[in-house]
Amino acid sequence: MKRNLLFIVNPISGIGKQKKIEALLDANIDKTLIDYTVRYTERIHHGKTLAHEAVEQGCFDAIVAVGGDGSVNDVVSGMAGSNIALGIIPCGSGNGLARNLKIPLTPSHAIEALNHYKIAEIDTIYLNERVVTSIAGIGFDARVARRMKQAKVRGLQAYAKIILSDYPTYKEHTFRLNIDGNEIERKAWFISFANSNQFGYNTAIAPLAKLDDGLIDVCIVDRIPLLHLPLTAPLLYLNHFELSQHVEYFKAHEVTVYNNDEKWVNIDGEGERIGTELHFYNTRKSLKVLVP
């Protein structure tokens, strides 16, 4: 019996890999196994609407997000509470969740993998009723995501330019957190709340994170002096960032932040204005995902 897939394409995601998606689908999907439909987003968060409509129609076996982590987040948000599986064709800048799931980063290869996929179950994190599939962040992380949202150009070069521009002047903030019932106060440059171990661009901000362990990996990072960057930055690529003297690491089921005074949060690579009080909690194995 054929499977029926819906592809939701963000036409402006990342660095443009998705622009030939219909030709790639025609060339790489096994049409003896799969029927498919393609729909394009037309505005911000339209992917959530399209995914919700697809769930209501009840005729698709899976919904495939074609884009980056932000596009994946929109699709998952629209699928919330359903039993439909998520597929990913990574066409964004960082592609953190796809990297963690070992989904090929070349779109044609990712499409080929859908011909004989298997289904894995992974966790999601909820933040004030917003879903997080990969990583959320506050502090400098949220500042960069907010700036990227306004940028005309995406990609690693644009990301690095914003970091270098804002790094010298951004000040640490003091955050009050409740981590599984234990209240702490920390002065931090940024804090990440991770489901995936991938920050994007093959950097592992939370190298101990697992997608199906029912836990949130909390990574509190103080301001890293410029002289320490040559020693600290490589740890992101070597999967050992937790070993840095500038990192404090926790694992938790539930976390509350009481004073996110800037009100912005990086949710899966997209800057979102959420508020000053943030409540994170893990929902274990709540999302089915198509993997190679």
Image (cartoon, helix red, strand yellow):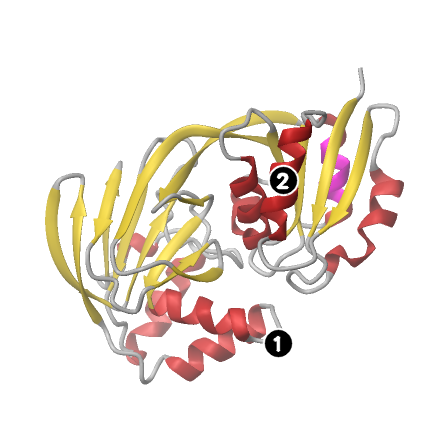
- Residue drawn at the location 69% of the way across and 63% of the way down: 12
Rounded to the nearest whole Å, what is the CA distance between mark 1 and mark 2?
Answer: 26 Å
**Residue 173 within the magenta-colored segment of the rendering:** no
- Badges 1 and 2: C-beta atoms under 8 Å apart? no
Circle 1 packing at 10 Å, graded few (<14), some (14-19), many (20+), is: few
- Left or right: 237, with 6 as reference point: left
- Tell which of 87 and 163 is nearer to you: 87
- Residue drawn at the location 63% of the way across and 30% of the way down: 56
Establish if 16 lies above or below 161.
above
- Left or right: 191, with 74 as reference point: left
- Residue drawn at the location 83% of the way across and 35% of the way down: 29
The residue singled out by tag 1 in the image is 152
Report whether residue 291 is seen. no
Report whether residue 179 is seen. yes
Establish if 260 lies above or below 57.
below
Residue 291: x and y, percent?
Answer: 62, 32
Q: Reading the chain from its start, which is encountered first: label 1 or label 2?
A: 2
Q: Is the magenta stretch mostly helix, strand or loop?
A: helix
Residue 155: x and y, percent?
Answer: 60, 68
Q: Where's the N terminus, which quadrant? A: top right
- Tell which of 64 and 188 is nearer to you: 64
Please state the total of marks drawn on the protein image.
2
- Left or right: 208, with 63 as reference point: left
Which element carries disc 2, helix, strand or loop? helix
The residue singled out by tag 2 in the image is 51
Instruction: Tell me the amino acid under the disc marked 1.
Output: Lys
Which element carries disc 1, helix, strand or loop? loop
- Tell which of 76 and 113 is nearer to you: 76
Residue 21: x and y, percent?
Answer: 80, 50
Residue 231: x and y, percent?
Answer: 33, 68
Circle 2 packing at 10 Å, graded few (<14), some (14-19), many (20+), is: many
Please provide the residue range marked out in magenta.
109-114
